[in-house]
Amino acid sequence: MKKKTAFFTLICLGVFALFFTSCQQERVAPPIETSNMDLSILPGDDFYRFVNGGWLENNPIPEEFSRYGSFEQLAEQNEEKLYDLLQTIRRDRNALPGSNRQKIRDFFNSAMDTVTQAEQGVDAIAFILEEIEQTGSTEQIPAIIASLHLRGFGPVFSIRAAQDRKNTEEMIANVFQGGLGMADRDHYLNEDSRSTEIRDNYKLFVEKIFILAGYDKNKAMQAREDIMSIETTLAEASMTRLERRNPHATYNKMNLDELQQLTPSFSWNDYLESINVKTSELNIGQPKFLEAFNELVNKKTIDQWRTYMKWNVLRSSAPFIGHDFEQAHFEFYTTVMTGSQQQRERWKIALAALNSALGEAVGQEYVAVHFPPESKERMVDLVEHLREAFRGRIETLEWMGPETKKNAFAKLDAINVKIGYPDKWTDYSDLHIKDQPHVLNVIAAREFNIARNLAEIGQPVDRDKWFMNPQTVNAYYSPTMNEIVFPAAILQPPFFFPHGDDAVNFGAIGMVIGHEITHGFDDQGRRYDKNGNLSEWWTEEDSRRFEERTKILVEQYNNYVMLDTLTINGELSLGENIADLGGLTIAFHALQNKLEQDGRPGEIDGFTPEQRFFIAYAQIWRNHMRDQRLMEQLRLGPHSPGEARVNGIVYNMQEFYDAFGIDANESQRFIAPEYRAEIW
Ligand SMILES: [Zn+2]
């Protein structure tokens, strides 16, 4: 789940499929292999390494990866499958013009054609840079920002249609802070040595790109200064990630007059007209950010603004306009930011671009071959077991009163479930992909996706829509839809074992289901009701008790040291940690109900069902991570690193101690009952 913004307020399982390489032979392996474990470690001392020690030892991180674990391995296998499909499609000369197959074929071919990319270089986007050059005064800034936004570039802010968080039947326009070339405001503002290092490299990156685009050294240095100045001002005015976790803070509905008063120097009429949006009301995520932008409009010369706009175009086009640009982009965003030194193979880069351009067209081909209908049936059954177990947990909660419980049951019952792939596929008729420079196909796809989104403003909500491709190894909960979604690609080992026993399936995909359900009841999700509306359904007393309980988890994670003295940010990762703890607890009880129904099997491979449950859980979070990537993850959250998702959770659970017969005396990580976190 690549960086979903708060527009869609999706909460993903926590894995960005970023860097894939090297082929893997598919094989049917048993769900648990003891060679992946380290049986010399006691489960009470370090459960993560007890389960994964062998795997960690035998699977060093490949060069191209900044993180490598279960998600990446499965994603690699998926890429091989997709590549096979693409080979057939690429050979399909009979694909009708305008058909999805023709678009997939031509897009992928243009992505593979590095010769044309290098030959055309920046010339391919010269017409956009020229348009920016023609911007003569600050009055024309709304029009040029609009033109760039429509093509998928992101100067200053972004605009998207999304459900109105207080009236989820309707789609409204949302304006959100943006315009930064680095991932977070902190990268511009923090003074620690890592932030300074990143910032220095970013400046070099800006300079390099402008030199590649034809600037001389002095002019490129000036461009760098102008860009840093504008972006730093925008960063200062940006909300922090922690502030953005409060959905009320980013809900500021305004009519056009109010919005115009906020930014006298930026005409919203001009902007909205240029993007062809007619609306009288918008949600403004960060009004203070727009105020700061308004001040900046006249503080900077039009020449400085033109430089900033060009930077947005060059930066975002760099991966598609030839080796030199691509390399500069890679060196900053991958090597500096994540620590990985090696580019992925060309076809994998091309595939990633294809997935983001024509995701559902590829997904449709993928599920036709690789998604057995039985998997869907088994998932439906699993989800209902999890829902039932959650209901049982709520019933027995001592800290929650009957009134709140009633609303919690209603919300739980209302959760919609999507499994595998959408019932209604995206219609790509209006997207024109052809034999042309890759960057133009990329822009065409972005234009198509943005136009499609903006057309939803003022329209009823499309409940069939998916926010993730079927071929993505991930899952999500949407608070405004109140739904959980499981793409086809995650329904494979080690998450889902079509022929595995219940214990391993409840510990792996069952926990994933429980995790997504619990997001509806974490510190953010609990603010939304059964219809996805931001509205208070908790009594004050119950809210207070919930927060008391979550504080324990915040404290625990704030003290979890991951690298030297760097710890996890307990507040930033709270929602995910609640979902992990709740998800695993609920999945455990769902398994108990199932075993009661069907009868208990004996041990398999020397492990009881309860032990297999926890082992299957710990397996899915095994991974290696480079220090740079880890530092970014700790800073930006919201997911805790894999080790903490295992060890930070299981030692809070009596069910875990019981499963492995661990008592206080024989565990280095034993948490006394009064200090344990227990929420759901
Ligand atoms: Zn999550």
Image (tube, rainbow, N blue to C red):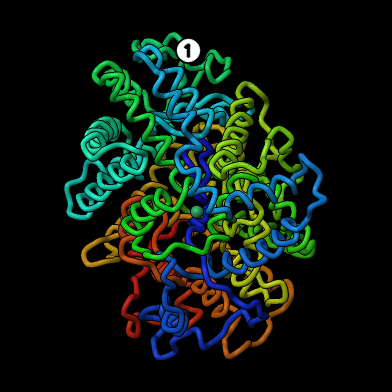
| Relative vertical location of residue 169 with respect to residue 326 in this rendering, above or below | above
Residue in the image at 60% along x and 36% along y: 444
Q: Nearer the viewer, residue 71 or 664?
A: 71
Q: Is residue 282 left or right of residue 545?
A: right
Q: Secondary structure at mark 1?
A: helix
Residue 241 seen anywhere in this rendered image of the structure: no
Residue 382, percent from left and from top = 69, 62
Relative placement, left or right, of 155 versus 604 is left
State the image coordinates of residue 324 (x, y, percent, origin top left). 40, 51
Question: Does residue 29 appear left or right of residue 116 in this picture?
Answer: right
Residue positioned 64% across, 82% down in the render: 29
Question: So how many labels did they put on this image?
Answer: 1
Q: Residue 598: which quarter of the image?
A: bottom right
Q: Give the image location of residue 309, x and y in percent.
A: 38, 29
Label 1 CB, ligand 1: below 8 Å? no
Residue 487 is situated, as x and y percent measured from the top left of the image, at 65, 55
Q: Residue at x 49, y 73 (%)?
A: 618
Mark 1 crowdedness (10 Å alpha carbons): few <14, some 14-19, many ≥20: some
- Classify residue 332 as left or right of residue 614: left
Residue in the image at 30% along x and 47% along y: 205
From this viewpoint, is residue 85 visible?
yes
Q: Quadrant of residue 244?
A: top left
Q: Nearer the viewer, residue 328 or 393?
A: 328
**Of residues 613 and 498, which is closer to you in this image?**
498
Residue identified by numbered label 1: 270
Which picture quadrant has residue 524? top left
In-front residue for pair 578/300? 300
| Type of amino acid at the residue the image marks with label 1 | Asp
| Residue placed furthest toward the front | 119
